[in-house]
Amino acid sequence: MSFTTERTRRLRSQPGARYTHPKALKAPAENGAHDSALDALAENAPNYLRWINEMIEPHLGRKVLELGAGIGVITESYAHGREVVANDLSDTCIAALRHRFEGSPNVTVVQHDLREVYDSGQRFDSVVMLNVLEHIEDDVGVLSALPSVLRPGGRIVIYVPALNALYGKPDRILGHFRRYSKWRFREIAAEAGLQIVELRYVNALAIPAWWIYSHSNTDQTYRPALSAWDRTGVPLSRALEERIRFPLGLNLLAVFTAAEGQSDGSQLALSPIWGMVARGVHWGRRLRNRDANAPDGPRVRGESLE
């Protein structure tokens, strides 16, 4: 067996679906960290948020359901000319969403279990989850349920942190079960009965800076550094990635559509996963407090770098 084949086998020794990073089990609970991170992005990374919006917009259609809409910065970017249902379980985020969209009749803010969305009879051209899926333990269960609220040909648009080798302190604080890779998403899509429309790494130039920050012992420079990167690194990254598809990236854009026969919700709607979809976003953000004082520790044998 060649070195490359053996190395690939070791790196992918963990299951693709429902994978939990070993360090996610050792995280101290830090309530409010996720909402604070949303504020930091809104205030210090407008170019980055516009870039995400430009990547997802071609896949949205006219009627959109966004799960884990946060404080609605990206939602606001794509909402014009569309009918949007913005869903979140955080009371703080719901208050921010209602304030932001109080004068926007085309945006409905809800704090619902997805079963309620399904029972309402609404069907969407797309379901959007931006930096949400990594908070949910059963990612396959969630994705396999989503076609039930899609119109025929509708799309599931996912944006997540990429590469488990980059998993560090910020991931644990924010309640991430994992980071993602292309091969992992291919396995997840197959198990969830989804077809891949687009799958690509983005934000490659940010990897070195993220690695340094995520393995440091301080977050004091996070907002100034984020602002500086947004002014310089993001425009350069966008320009390069319009011409070059990098083999790795700090984030990953994944777009799926239901395989034939998967859009019938008559069976999926009865599954307990409907509660898990919405509650998982909330629970994932609160982190499991297994060992509040545990250090990062060495890499666990068999842990996937991707």
Image (tube, rainbow, N blue to C red):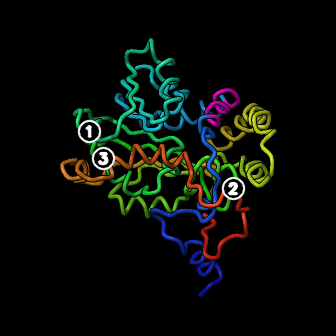
Q: Amino acid at mark 2?
A: Gly
The region drawn magenta spans 36-45
Left or right, 192 with reference to 27 = left
Q: Position of residue 263 (x, y in %)?
A: 25, 48
Q: Which mark is residue 118?
A: 1
**Residue 126: which disc?**
none
Residue at 28 percent of width and 41 percent of height: 115
Residue type at the position of mark 1: Tyr
Badge 3 or badge 2: first in the primary sequence: 3
Q: Residues within 10 Å of mark 1 (few under 14, many from 20)?
A: some
Point out the tag, 2 or 1, that comes first from the N-terminus: 1
Q: What residue sits right under mark 2 in the picture?
A: 168
Dots 2, 1 in contact, CB < 8 A: no
Crowdedness near tag 2: few (<14), some (14–19) or many (≥20) residues, C-alpha within 10 Å:
many
Please identify the quadrant where the C terminus is shown: bottom right
Q: What amino acid is found at the position of numbered circle 3 in the picture? A: Pro
Image x and y of residue 225, in percent: 79, 37
Separation of marks 3 and 2 at Cα, in angstroms? 32 Å
Which is more toward the observer, 137 or 227?
Answer: 137
In the image, which is nearer the foreground, mark 3 or mark 1? 1
Which residue reaches farthest top? 103
- State the residue position of label 3: 147
Q: Is residue 87 magenta?
A: no
* Point 28% across, 36% down: residue: 116
Q: Give left or right: position of 50 versus 204.
A: left
**Which mark sits nearer the N-terminus, 3 or 1?**
1
